[in-house]
Image (cartoon, helix red, strand yellow):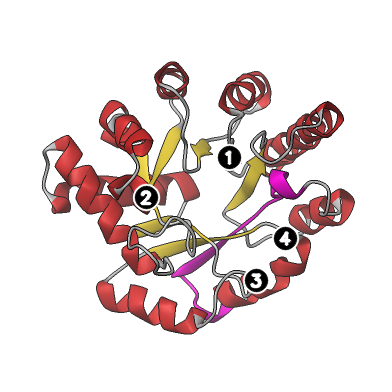
Amino acid sequence: MIDAHAHLIPDFMKNIEDSIKNARKLGLKAVINSAIEPHQFDFATKLAETHQNFIFTSLGFAPQRIKQIPFAETYNAISQNTSIVAIGEVGLDYHWIHESHWRIKQKKIFKQFIELANTLEKPLVIHSRKAESDCIDILERFAKVPILMHCFAGNMSETTRVIDLGWMISIPTAVVNRKKHRKIARKAPLEQIVAETDSPFLSPIPRKRNEPANVKYAIEELANLKHLSFEEVDTITTRNAKILFNL
């Protein structure tokens, strides 16, 4: 198993080392750790150094926090970090950001990160909450690298576009209790799916913090939806993640 997207960051989680131990004990092969603000970057980088070949780093710019995050500092830090396996999450967020001028700025910043990913030849991890269509339009036009639609929740037409473009879709642990993720999981070919927790968010267990070990719940639900064994889904989603992030 590989958790393709988690936030093992003190801003969000306590007892991070315990969560890593739990993941190793369960047999996970890797966790992709996403830091989304520049003050988190050093911690994420050092965590990956401490847990080499198990924790891998993705650095991004949370679009829902566009009003608070300094763009230049974030961009420069990401562009100079040689250890990352992906850029993200980056993208658009129309759930929290409603003002047109901020949405325009989101698009401008998004395009700059796409250009950076193209230059560094790193895959992009995409945040597209309530902005799926615009994200797909921009990516289709500008991106030249592999794409992962993180915790994708688009409609069936948008899901079809993503599939036809050959991009990856990450199915979160919330698939066990959210119909929209089950619909997408049924439609997407397993060859274009990876599993994620989005820890500590989207827990499959009510009132409990999510953690990477819980990725097993996403794989179990995928196995049920695809009428396959856990082992088959685990093998394919793990292989997909290894290829996507060049692990």
193 lies above or below 7: above
Residue under circle 4? 81
For residue 1, say whether it is visible. Answer: no
- Going by the image, does 216 lie left or right of 78? left
Secondary structure state at the residue bearing disc 2: helix
| Number of the label disc, if any, that sits on residue 174 | 2
Mark 1: which amino acid? Ile
Q: Decide: marks 3, 1 in contact (CB < 8 A)?
A: no
- Residue stretch rendered in magenta on the structure: 49-65
Q: Do the residues labelled 3 and 2 touch (CB within 8 Å)?
A: no
Precedes in sequence: disc 3 or disc 1:
3
Residue at image mark 1 = 126
| Rendered view: 241 above or below 17 | above
Which is in the foreground here, disc 3 or disc 4? 3
Where does the image place residue 72, in percent across and percent down from the top left?
88, 50
Residue nearest the observer in this picture, 112 or 172: 172
Question: Is label 1 in a helix, a strand or a loop?
Answer: strand
Q: Mark 3 points at which residue?
A: 11
Mark 2 is surrounded, within 10 Å at the Cα level, by few (under 14), some (14 to 19) or many (20 or more) other residues, namely: many
Mark pair 1, 4: CA separation: 19 Å
Q: Are marks 2 and 1 in contact (CB under 8 Å)?
A: no
